[in-house]
Image: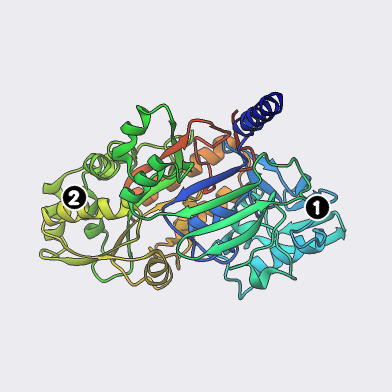
Amino acid sequence: MFARLKFSVAALALTAGAAMAQQTDITVGMQLEPPNLDPTGGAAAAIDEVVYANLFEGLTRYTSDGSIAPALAESWDISEDGTEYTFHLRDGVTFHDGSTMDAEDVKFSLDRARAEDSTNAQKALFAGISEVEVVDPLTVKVTLSGPNSAFPNNMAWGDAVIVAPESIDNAATAPVGTGPFMFSDWVQGDRVELVAYDGYWGEKPALTAATFKFISDPTAAFAAMMAGDIDVFPGYPAPETLVQFEADPRFKLLIGSTEGETILGMNNKSEALSDPKVREAIAHAINRQEIIDGAMFGYGTPIGTHFAPHNPDYVDLTGLSDYDPDASKALLAEAGQEGLTLSLKLPPPSYARRGGEIIAAQLRAVGIETQIENLEWAQWLEQVFTGKDFDLTIVSHTEPMDINIYARPDYYFQYGKPEFVELMDALNLATDPAERSSILEQAQTMIAEDYVNGYLFQLARTGVANANIEGLWENAPTQANDLTGVSWSQ
């Protein structure tokens, strides 16, 4: 009897210990699967959502409040004329294959990104670099062709992470970085798995493993969260069900802002849309609130230009493109474009698919028919983003402070007005806050008055998480699911 009692006490102790053991793995839901895992060679936001700050790191990085912090560079000096940045690298940093990360790798990464044959989706971030010089193994001097006060911000983008020549050729499917997590497995069509990297230079994460699970269907996403198959879904695709999670003590909501300007993208060089009157007619045909209510169930802030409303330099220009179907019809008649039919190519996110149906009905009401084509993400990148084979599309631009994309004439909506390019050049040179604010106001106004795109809403951050998870980002200052500070409470 005594022996049995001893066994029972021991069993109870083991059971209690197991119950108290803190969970150290996490499963993160994502609606879109990345086309590859190399942030320096792809435009899809889903790449950064997996690897940014987790697997890859840059010289600098975005933090949860949107500020810029040191990363692989622990500090940097700026010359008096603003054209030389000297980065002081952290000592003891290694890549996941055990090789040392040093100044040669930084030079390789920046030179590769700015090379003539570069496939970097944000090559413009590096266009102002005239020379990258290795001073010593832990010091790199970057010389710019002109002052650029935003250069530390540019180096925080996912497209500017530091890679090694020995491993970059396999980065699309087997990435090697310097972050706190290293690549473990990719079951295409299902999940990507990361595990903690024992040799990490910085503070070790509380998590030992992370799985990014891809669930494109909103109904399936709801079922997976309810069943506990997913621990957190930061970009939850079924906002209509958030009220159910809010009422369930097992969960908490992560409602915040993003950098995602959601637009009705227009091909400014397609036959009909090269006429600004037609673009203005389309803008006046759009009822923003109807789209926010119907596609996002009320989550979202109306915008009238390509700029985040939470930014202190935001200008409310929604009045320039207010809902006015009569004005829309008159503009179409003026342009001789009654009976117009346009292609509307939609990527997978629910804001695009649901929003597309609503916009199609709104355009039909003013006499514009649309041919809707639902594309998978890889198709959208090929046909719309790269091939420019479209009239209209809907997409959320989640990169931070990205109004400068309108200065690129070959960007998918094909604007690149010379006067706008001059504004962006002036912005790069400006260091006075008041001057920068004035330039940004002019830039916002110019693209709004030119009706480059139809400006819909700022994408809200609508996430759902297990109530016991701590350290998740509520807002999304960049396109990332940063797990470096995430843990489970007891």
Q: Quadrant of residue 100?
A: bottom right
Give me the disc on residue 93. Answer: 1
Q: Foreground: 360 or 422?
A: 360
Q: For this view, does 27 lie left or right of residue 359?
A: right
Q: Is residue 450 visible?
A: no
Position of 432 relative to 29 (above/below): above
Write down the residue under mark 2: 285
Q: Secondary structure at mark 2?
A: helix
x, y (%) of residue 296? 30, 42
Q: Foreground: 147 or 1?
A: 1
Q: Earlier in the sequence, mark 1 or mark 2?
A: 1
Residue sitting at the far front: 1
Position of 277 relative to 19 (above/below): below
Badge nearest the viewer, 1 or 2: 1
Residue type beneath disc 1 = Val
Using the numbered discs, state the Cα–Cα distance from disc 1 to disc 2 in whole angstroms. 54 Å
Q: Secondary structure at mark 1?
A: loop
Q: Foreground: 50 or 107?
A: 50
x, y (%) of residue 242? 34, 35
x, y (%) of residue 480? 54, 48
> Which quadrant: the N terminus?
top right
> Which quadrant: the C terminus?
top right
Position of 436 relative to 37 (above/below): above
Residue type beneath disc 2 = Ala
Q: Foreground: 63 or 32?
A: 32
